[in-house]
Image (cartoon, grey):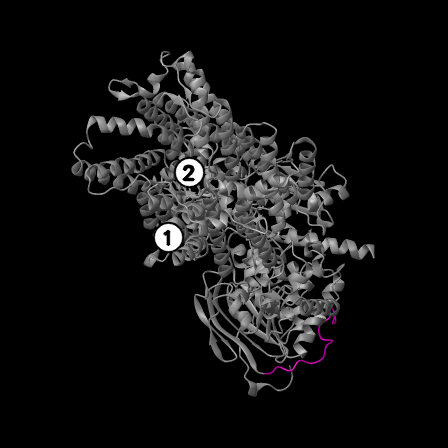
Amino acid sequence: MAEKASSNQVNQATNQEIRDETNLTSLPNNSSPPSSPPILPERSFLPPWLRSIGQTYGAVIALMLLLLYNVFFTPYFMTIQTLNINLTQVSTIVIVATGMTMVIATGGIDLSVGALMAVGGAAAPLIFLNPPFGDQTFGNVLSFIVPVLIAGAFGLFNGGLITFFRIQPIIATLVLFIAGRGIAQVATNGKLQTFSNSTFEFIGLGQLFGVRFQVILMVVVVLIAAWVMHVSTFGRYVLAIGGNEPAARLAGVPVNRVKLIVYGVSGLLAGIAGLIVIAINTSSDANKVGLGMELDAIAAVAVGGTPLTGGRATIFGTLIGALIMQLIRYTLLANGIPDAVSLVIKAGIILGAVYVQRQRQS
Amino acid sequence: MSTEQSNLTGSTEQLNDATGSGNGKGRMPHNIARLAGLMQRQGALLALIVVIILAGWRYDNFLSIANITSVLRYNSMFGLIALGMTFVIITGGVDLSVGSVVAFTSVIAAHVSPTGPIVGLIVPVLAGALVGLVNGFVIAKLRILPFITTLATLLAARGLALSFANNTAVSVSQDSGFTSIGQGDLWGIPVPAIILFGAYLIGAVLFYYTRFGRHVLAIGGNEEATRLMGLPVDRIKIIVYIISGGLAGLAGVILASQYGAGQPTEASGWELSAIASVVVGGTLLTGGFGSVGGTLVGVFLLGLIINILNFENGRGTTSLSAYWQSVIRGGFLLIVVLIQNRLMNRRQR
Amino acid sequence: MEESKSLLTMEGITKTFPGVLALQGARLKVGYGEVHALIGQNGAGKSTLIKILTGAYRRDKGTILFDDKNIDFHSPQQAQMGGVSTIYQEVNLVPFRSVSENIFLGREPRRFGLLDWKTMNRQSATLLERFGIRINVTQPLLTFNVATQQMVAIARAISFQSKLVIMDEPTSSLDEPEVATLFEVIRQLKQEGVSVIFISHRMDELYAVCDKVTVMRDGQTVVTRPIAGVSKLELIALMLGKELGEVRRKGLTAFGKEGEHHADRLLLEARKLKRGQKLRGVDVSVKAGEIVGLAGLLGAGRTETARAIFGADTLEGGEIEVDGKRRNFKSPRDAIKAGIGLCSEDRKIEGIIPYMSVRENLTLALLPRLNRYGIVQRKKQQAIVENFIKKLGIKTSGPEQKIRELSGGNQQKVLLARWMCLNPRLLILDEPTRGIDVGAKGEIQSLIGELATEGLGVLMISSELEELTEGCDRVVVLREGQSVAELSKQNEDLNQDMIMAVMAQGGNLTTAPPTISTAEEKDGNG
């Protein structure tokens, strides 16, 4: 029995060596020999059981701790108002980060989300302030749909660059990162568009059963995305591509199509988030909408536990990651720490989360 | 960067790996390769010359001393960060924090401005270099992607800038001579321009005449090979980010002294202009190939766009807003990236 | 025979990786000014031995004497400083940099602190001229063809005053005239007293330029002989561990127990497949119910053939007919729809999705059929997975276990199941039993046999002669990208000696072009 086990290991490791055989250029990682025992070697000072709990529930535990801290030390924390404020502020981030999670799951990244938010946010007032045929209702309806579609189209543009032109995702989405906001600025001439359109503002300021509409929207988006990623066939494709793209391709997964869709969806969601933001502010400033959102989204994804290398995704993790970042900001503010410092702390957390992820992988 | 990770990292890892391991099977026809290199390098220069000629013909005051010095003075800051960005991109990385560092160091410059132009210049540059050191360390030793690292530093530096400035502009001392850095002239040439050209001269020497410069290029071209050959890859990478931070610091000094105040909210998005200038100037975004001179051309090419927009608006024939800048920059980036990609793909055949 | 002084003596080299004995008392002896061939199949240990020599790995046991000194290099760079250089298969230099920069990278000559380009260029040009190469050393490396690039790599090695140059598959990307130039360079090196270790799977080349040959197998050095005194056939036999003409034991594999195959209609016919340098005219056909083997040495083009048929790579020339219809698969998806499956060679790189479960890996290719209203039909999926786990005897704690935790053999079974559950008509298997323990090997072999009896057509690539001779009805032998012979049980020429002989292409052997037997010629004898 033991012999069989070790011979299994023999064959396991032989594979690695076989691959090394054919390539003298393969340097050992950090001068350690190639080895692939069936289970990953443990590499930490924490006992295994603690580590595994940390891996699966790390983000949740962090969130719990943050909440507890605030319950005890922050005045007026346990109020509906606080809850509302926080949820509201976090909704747009979650919506965008959900799209980002799927993109990252395929092993890519989308830097253009902030710019696309600005595009969506710029397009909407342009439509409902000048409704076609003078029909305000029609204009309002269009102003919900068209900006989102435009953002989605830009997302497809990203996807196209990546799949057909084989440009790396970072570079491909960098183009719109730079130009997207400019397009929005050109369209609005950089001017602030203020408006008062109660139908439209509902998306940002309205309430349903006492809950802000965008929170409901956030929940819906999260639920749908979770369904897609965990239950649907499409989600399986996404994870397969991120896990091992050549293998997925060989197994008949429609890699190009999936990638296109995923980037398109990321664009769509960014468009929606843009609408929410301008609705909340009842004004659209192409210079400001969505500024820095890409970092917030990536941070939420990373802190939430989705590896930036792709192949695995947790939508709920992203939700929690966003909540954690939000809570941290709130905690700092509520305790009198200037916003500026919180930026530094945010940066530290992002780096920390990514670093921890990398350690996990090795 | 080691080829360990995925497509995402494959995105930045491949930023220096795409042209990587020699690909023994590729035979690039001699003439196409030379044409490609030529096109990349001289294309931007040609475009710049054409633009200058056309603009000089079209707008009356375009070639006036006043306009030239004003263009030089304004673009000196962009030019400096683009120089640092060139080195970083050639190693296959990217430094997104430069904008925030400029803001941060401008605040520091404002604070130390009473001590005069010399200390007022050295301290902020050191501060910028320090940020660069942090970047370099995290990227080279902790092996976190340059994109993520510098994005985080972007946040942190902005935060530091705001805290050091108490969220408002910090006035610069007017009688210490500090302002002469940004506003002064030397034999009719604006001081910032002198600093700019001086920096590029040094950069060019480093690039073409020192081992360091050649090694920077080698790392970007094939990191694995250069490691194998025993080059101190990590150390070189760290130095490159220090340079980028230091140059951003220099730009911050110029910003503070030119506008009379350290501004913690300024320079947002400058890193993108820098990247665009570098790429337009012929440096491969994936690393391993590029030139210092090309970046300078790229800086002015893109910088002149604003200038021309102003003139065009002045003629009253159009009123293109300055916002077209980003669109044009993005467009340039797209075209250049596509061209670079085509050339690379043909090479891999 | 007197012992002349050797430049390099490696004695008793042993190296173990966790669970694997990679080298066991391996030896290598190279004289001064000697060109020494090092050959062996995949997994034989040659690359490990070389890596130990150059310092990429540390040995567990053994001694290395280089130029009369005991050495223990810690890195390839240290080895280079010590006189041992390596030329890699994929030219490992910096493509955008000029030729002279590449030669001097890391030790660029300086004058007053600044780079001395003139001296650098001059010295590079001189170096290359020693080999008769006259090129503009200021041009980027990539503007030159591969052969020249390799010369530059060699020139760099020489500039380090190397006494020993290791060349790993140096000719794999060269065409004939370039190979000739390379050989000239090697002879030049020899004249200057530099020794060369020449690793190659192209047997003919060895005879052209090498003095001695060392054969390795299973981590040990089998033999070292002057190359003039040993034939190609003998070398192949030594590499594969066979003795020529010996009476073969039967029943070494689990093939053949499933009963007779009845070859039916023609499923696949591929003609003159061409793609780059790797495929230069391959013909192969498979009928339903038969197992066709694809044999050949490393680099013969077997995997490339499989991928081309499956649509994973684009064909540059040739035709493929499935069921008599011309097909042009643009992607594996198309091939799968046409009823073809490909279980690839390297399961780590192209097979398993590591973080996914056994269940998901197994049904990956089946997802389109399990898809209803966008959701995967779990019950159906579960049933299929459990069925195959049982059928193939996959040892796993359950369908949800992450596939990376399984042993190699079980991973391979999951991958096999991935294709089997599609009910393909034609299954292409690339080294299906490689790296698997004996027990699982047998199980997989029986499975493959059963598939054929059930009417599947199987195209099997294998490096194990027994699998080919016992399991296949016909075997197509590839050599250097071309199909050179077809052996069949029917013609009674399907035996190990014959396969090796064809691989070697020596001796009197009728290398008739592969015959496509039509339905009429079938005489009911598999």
Looking at the image, do the residues carrying marks 2 and 1 touch, with CB atoms under 8 Å apart? Answer: no
* Kind of residue indicated by mark 2: Leu
Vertical placement of residue C98 versus C198, above or below: above
Q: Secondary structure at mark 2?
A: helix
Query: Residue at left 29%, top 28%?
Result: B72
**Residue C416 in picture, x, y percent from top left:** 66, 66
Looking at the picture, does residue C525 appear above or below residue C232? below
Q: Which numbered disc covers residue A127?
A: 1
Q: Label 2 neighbourhood size at 10 Å, few (<14), some (14-19), many (20+)?
A: many
Quick check: C413 above or below B48? below
Chain under numbered label 1 = A
Residue B188 placement, left or right of C208? left
Q: Would residue B67 be counted in the magenta stretch?
A: no
Left or right? Give the position of B43 relative to B347. Answer: left
- The amino acid beneath tag 1 is Ile
Residue located at (33% from left, 40% from top): B325
Identify the magenta region: C248-264
Q: Which residue is mark 2?
A: C127
Chain identifier of the residue bearing label 2 in the image: C
Separation of marks 2 and 1 at Cα, in angstroms: 71 Å
Is C425 on the left-hand or right-hand side of B294? right
Residue at horizontal 76 percent and vertical 59 percent from the top:
C397
Give the SS element for disc 1: helix
Is there any visible trace of residue B44 in the rendered image?
Answer: yes
Give the percent coordinates (x, y) of residue A294: 50, 43
- Of circles 2 and 1, which is in front? 1
Q: Nearer the viewer, residue B298 or C180?
A: B298
| Side of A282 where C165 appears, left or right | right
Q: Quick one: B209 or B3, which is closer to the camera? A: B3
- Any magenta on residue C262? yes
Numbered tag placed on residue B162 in the rendering: none
Farthest residue, direction right = A1
